[in-house]
Amino acid sequence: MPISGSLPAITPFFVPSPRVAGSQAAEAPPAREAASPSAGAEARRSQVDARATRETAQLDEAELDLLRKLKARDREVRAHEQAHQAVGGAYAGAVSYTYQRGPDGAQYAVGGEVSIDVAPVAGDPQATIDKMRTVRAAALAPAEPSGQDRAVAAQAMQLMLQAQTELAMMRLDGESKDSAGASAESQGRPDEAARAYRVVDAFADGQSTATSPDRFNARA
């Protein structure tokens, strides 16, 4: 489910982090605190923050504006594709992103895609119906589905309708067979009634030998 509309590429400028720190962050920590591992790590972070602050300040207004747009686009793309994957579950593949380097040197996602399995379940229309419901929900999961997302949802709906038709025909065929079996059973009953009548008639004629099961079967 690709997302189009990447931002124009620009010449990159390397900035390790956009975080802002105070001017005193570049100062070396006291010798007493340098012996502590946590204090040393904090000092290194402060130095990186200070360098980032100085280098970010070198970006012009256009580059800062592009950086803000890239960060917003990155959040949007990731949320979009993660929504597909979360709802698609076992039918959704891994997320694939398209990146663009920002003026701070970092990579930002500007496009993405998640593969979705839309193949029907062979020989099982009910399973196909359940699967296509999940696929359609996954395609429309993002807040703003793309044109490709809607196309996948439409395809899943079409396959689901076909499976529903197939399932209805299977059930109708099963009901027809049951009805035919019941009809055949009912047609056999008059013959049984006729044999019972002959037994009663034999009693009326004084033919007591007709009460023998073997004799009855022979007469039938």
Image (cartoon, rainbow, N blue to C red):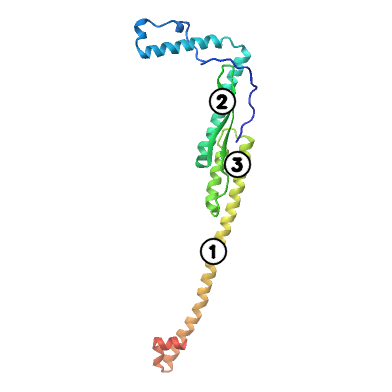
| Residue 88 locus on image (x, y percent) | 52, 40
Question: Circle 3 sits on which residue?
Answer: 153
Cβ atoms under marks 3 and 1 closer than 8 Å = no
Q: Nearer the viewer, residue 177 or 1?
A: 1
Q: Is residue 202 above or below residue 139?
A: below
| Secondary structure under the numbered disc 1 in the rendered image | helix
* Residue type at the position of mark 2: Asp
Q: Amino acid at mark 3?
A: Ala
| Disc 1 and disc 2 in contact, CB within 8 angstroms | no
Could you tell which of marks 1 and 2 lies nearer the N-terminus?
2
Q: CA distance from mark 3 to mark 1?
A: 33 Å
Type of amino acid under label 1: Glu
Query: Mark 3 or mark 1, which has the lower sequence index?
Result: 3
Q: Residues within 10 Å of mark 3 (few under 14, many from 20)?
A: many
Q: Quadrant of the N terminus?
A: top right
Q: Nearer the viewer, residue 194 or 112?
A: 112
Give residue 177's position: percent from left, percent from top: 54, 66
User: In the drawing, does residue 218 fall left or right of residue 4?
Assistant: left
Mark number displayed over residue 74: 2
Q: CA distance from mark 2 to mark 3?
A: 24 Å
Residue located beneath label 1 in the image: 175
The image quarter in which residue 169 lies: bottom right
- The location of residue 115, given as percent across then percent down, is 57, 38
Q: Of callouts 2 and 3, which one flags the residue occurring earlier in the amino acid sequence? A: 2
Percent of width and height locating residue 126: 53, 52
Residue 131, relative to residue 77: is it above or below? Answer: below
Looking at the rendered structure, the secondary structure element under dot 3 is: helix
Residue at the far bottom: name it: 206
Residues at discs 2 and 3 in contact (Cβ within 8 Å): no
